[in-house]
Image (tube, grey):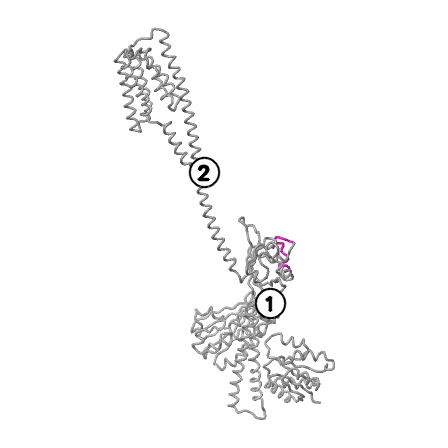
């Protein structure tokens, strides 16, 4: 529709505003031919001066030829205004040759005058006036005489003035018309551009709507697929506005029952929220009215993702332990508009952990009971004064006792490792000196070292080193390191145990000249049941729990462990423990 | 007068081991039983000076016996030694809280038990 309007407008403009010179000239040419024929055919008309009349026709003919040339060669069109001027001269001559002032054909002059007047530019009004004047005064110009009467003079000025005035009117009308046309055209172009933009915008809208629909489908699919986790959305005050199938499965209510009706804190144990609020020192949050809710979302509100264990209260009042992650929802400007609560039911995980603890406890108990009998009766045998054993039997007995003790230690280690893993790690901590621990460890290791032909050295600090710790556990840790060092050092080697203080720390170092540990294995050394290849290759007994336990003990004392080793040269374990405050140590 | 003892443990080997130590220390065994209910019955019947009880036993645990005994004013003079192979650090504290006087962790040394019983006998 609009294109049609545009095409019509263009055509109209082209025809009206920019007709070719040939088209414009055709009116004058046809009129002159008609006049020539008329003046020959009608008796009484004829030529008063045939030379001038024929010349006039010739000049108009020349103008017509020029107009055809200009039309053919577009770049000459800018000189097109020469054509009506030539026409005026030609018509002036033709008029002079057909009777001068009495000529029937004076009115033909109007045709080039209109052409000139319609041209863009006011100067053409003057050109039209002067041209008319020349055309009308042509007889006097050719005969080089002056008009003899005042009427003749006036004809030379008055008529051109009328023509000029008419030209001015035509010129102005043409200008107005051009102006209007250009405005209409501009408006049409504007409309066209706007329409184009609207079409493009509609296409974009359609595309983004399709994208939105695809995302919406994906989101709904994911939302419905999460059936094992409860996903709950709330506004900033905790009012629930999103509730997934997992939430229904874990907590009971359907989305319709929960959304816009219930708050997230309706599903929490009030005293748990209260405890957490106290822990966080009652954060103000978004709403001071509900400190429990503020505590629940405090980390999320500060932009930290938080995951911790809570108990949800089901619709029927029963509790379900959950691992709950809280994150905040923000609008486009980044302002908090609510929170998301994603929770997994950890009932099973807790049950598994409990069963594991129970199992480990049971196994340890069941293993220790027969060991109690074995060790007890072996001791009775050793102590039986009425039936003393031979030296050989005593030796057999020692082997049995040693292995029973080893089994007992292993059971203890296994249990201890399980306790460390489950986070239950009993420490009986007090302020204690480290020297006795070191000395005792050396003394208890000496028989084994002597038997293995290993030299034991001990370095103690000048000032006493006190730490806050569990003497039994720390003793166990140091014993582990020394017995390892002895196990991994060949006959004739040296094991050095040193205690130093360094700044705020006490440092216990156990250095051996043993077989060492491959660099690639150093980082795995403290993991459970890991055994270095040097240990397995040299058939050194052990199950790979000692270092795990040692490290766990040191970490529980807020200390750290490090190891340096070189295969074939030796190994050095360093245990760093924070010193107890001086006042307490004295 | 020889101090008297009731021994209770569901493991017969341990029960024998304890009994041997008791005899070695010169104390008299009034009863040696394999479950908690029998142990409490024996205590009520024989009114011994000392009861050596395993913590985990069928029918009644050592802890339950302790509590029952401490509710019975007529048994005020009874001393109780609890034995346990439990690895839970709290067992000792729980046992003493239940009314036991002494606690011995398994495995134990019969030699040490004999010494302890002998000393105790003299102290009493």
On the rendered image, what quadrant is the C terminus of chain A found in?
bottom right
Label 2: element kind = helix
Is residue A174 shown above or below A439? above
Q: Which label is found at residue A194?
A: 2
Q: Is residue A574 left or right of residue A154?
A: right
Q: Which label is found at residue A580?
A: 1
Is residue A568 shown above or below A332? below
Label 1: element kind = loop
Subunit of mark 2? A
Nearer-the-camera pick, A116 or B99: A116
Whole-percent x and y of residue A532?
45, 73
Q: Magenta region: which residues? A: A277-288
Examine the structure image and report whether residue A291 is included in the region drawn in magenta: no
Q: Residues within 10 Å of mark 2 (few under 14, many from 20)?
A: few
Q: Look at the numbered discs 2 and 1 and tell me whether their residues touch, using CB distance below 8 Å.
A: no
Nearer-the-camera pick, A445 or B106: B106
Q: Quadrant of residue A423?
A: bottom right
Q: Quadrant of residue A187?
A: top left
Discs 2 and 1 lie in a common subunit:
yes
Whole-percent x and y of residue A221?
50, 57
* Marks 2/1: CA–CA distance: 81 Å
- At 50% from the left and 68% from the top, the residue drawn is A562
- At 42% from the left and 27% from the top, the residue drawn is A179
Subunit of mark 1? A
Nearer-the-camera pick, A48 or A552: A48
Nearer-the-camera pick, B63 or A209: A209
Is residue A81 among the parts visible in the rendering?
A: yes
Whole-percent x and y of residue A523?
47, 68
| Number of marks | 2
């Amino acid at each position: 529709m609009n294109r049609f309007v545009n095409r019509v407008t263009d055509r109209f403009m082209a025809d009206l505003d920019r007709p070719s010179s040939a088209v414009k000239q055709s009116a004058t040419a046809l009129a002159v031919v008609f006049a020539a024929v008329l003046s020959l055919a009608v008796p009484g008309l004829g030529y008063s001066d045939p030379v001038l009349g024929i010349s006039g026709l010739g000049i108009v003919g020349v103008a017509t030829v020029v107009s055809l040339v200009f039309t053919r060669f577009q770049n000459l069109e800018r000189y097109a205004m020469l054509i009506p001027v030539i026409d005026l001269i030609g018509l002036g001559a033709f008029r002079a040759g057909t009777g001068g002032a009495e000529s029937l054909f004076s009115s033909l002059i109007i045709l080039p005058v209109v052409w000139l007047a319609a041209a863009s530019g006011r100067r053409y009004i003057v050109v039209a006036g002067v041209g008319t004047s020349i055309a009308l005064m042509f007889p006097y110009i050719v005969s080089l005489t002056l008009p003899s009467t005042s009427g003749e003079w006036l004809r030379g000025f008055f008529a051109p003035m009328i023509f000029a005035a008419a030209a001015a009117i035509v010129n102005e009308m043409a200008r107005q018309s051009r102006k209007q046309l250009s405005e209409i055209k501009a408006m049409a172009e504007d409309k066209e551009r706007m329409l184009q933009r609207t079409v493009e915008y509609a296409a974009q809208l359609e595309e983004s709507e399709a994208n939105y629909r695809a995302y919406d489908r994906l989101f709904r699919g994911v939302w419905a697929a999460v059936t094992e986790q409860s996903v709950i959305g709330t506004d900033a005050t905790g009012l629930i506005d999103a509730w997934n199938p997992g939430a229904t499965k874990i907590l009971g209510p359907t989305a319709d029952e929960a959304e816009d009706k219930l708050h997230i804190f309706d599903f929490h144990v009030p005293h748990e929220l209260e405890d957490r609020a106290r822990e966080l020192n009652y954060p103000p949050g978004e709403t001071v009215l509900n400190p429990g809710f503020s505590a629940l979302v405090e980390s999320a509100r500060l932009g930290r993702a938080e995951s911790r264990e809570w108990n949800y209260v089901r619709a029927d009042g029963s509790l379900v332990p959950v691992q709950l992650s809280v994150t905040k929802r923000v609008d486009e400007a980044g302002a908090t508009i609510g929170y998301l609560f994603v929770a997994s039911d950890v009932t099973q995980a807790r049950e598994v952990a409990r069963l594991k603890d129970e199992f480990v406890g049971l196994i340890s108990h069941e293993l220790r009971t027969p060991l109690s009998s074995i060790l007890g009766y072996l001791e009775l045998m050793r102590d039986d004064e009425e039936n003393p054993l031979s030296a050989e039997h005593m030796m057999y007995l020692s082997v049995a006792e040693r292995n029973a003790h080893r089994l007992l230690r292993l059971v203890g280690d296994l249990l201890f490792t399980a306790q460390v893993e489950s986070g239950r790690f009993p420490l009986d901590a007090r302020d204690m000196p480290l020297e006795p621990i070191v000395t005792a460890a050396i003394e208890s290791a000496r028989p084994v070292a002597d038997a293995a032909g290993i030299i034991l050295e001990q370095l103690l600090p000048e000032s006493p080193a006190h730490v806050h710790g569990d003497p039994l556990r720390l003793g166990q840790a140091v014993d582990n390191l020394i017995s390892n060092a002895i196990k991994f050092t060949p006959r004739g080697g040296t094991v050095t145990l040193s205690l130093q203080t360094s700044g705020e720390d006490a440092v216990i170092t156990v250095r051996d000249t043993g077989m060492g540990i491959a660099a690639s294995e150093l980082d795995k050394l403290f993991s459970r049941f890991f055994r270095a290849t040097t240990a397995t290759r040299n058939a050194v007994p052990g199950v790979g729990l000692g270092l795990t336990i040692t490290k766990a003990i040191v970490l529980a004392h807020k200390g750290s462990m490090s190891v340096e080793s070189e295969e074939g040269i030796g190994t050095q374990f360093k245990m760093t423990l924070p010193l107890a405050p001086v006042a307490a140590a004295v | 007068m020889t101090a008297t003892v009731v021994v209770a443990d569901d493991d017969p080997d341990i029960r024998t081991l304890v009994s041997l130590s008791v005899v070695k220390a010169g104390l008299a065994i009034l009863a040696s039983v394999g479950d908690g209910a029998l142990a409490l019955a024996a205590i009520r019947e024989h009114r011994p000076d000392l009861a050596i009880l395993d913590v985990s036993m069928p029918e009644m645990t050592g802890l339950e016996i302790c509590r029952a005994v401490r509710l019975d004013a007529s048994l005020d003079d009874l001393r109780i030694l609890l034995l346990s192979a439990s690895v839970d650090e709290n067992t000792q504290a729980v046992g003493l809280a239940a009314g036991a006087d002494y606690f011995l962790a398994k495995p134990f040394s019969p030699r040490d038990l004999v010494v302890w019983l002998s000393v105790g006998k003299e102290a009493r």
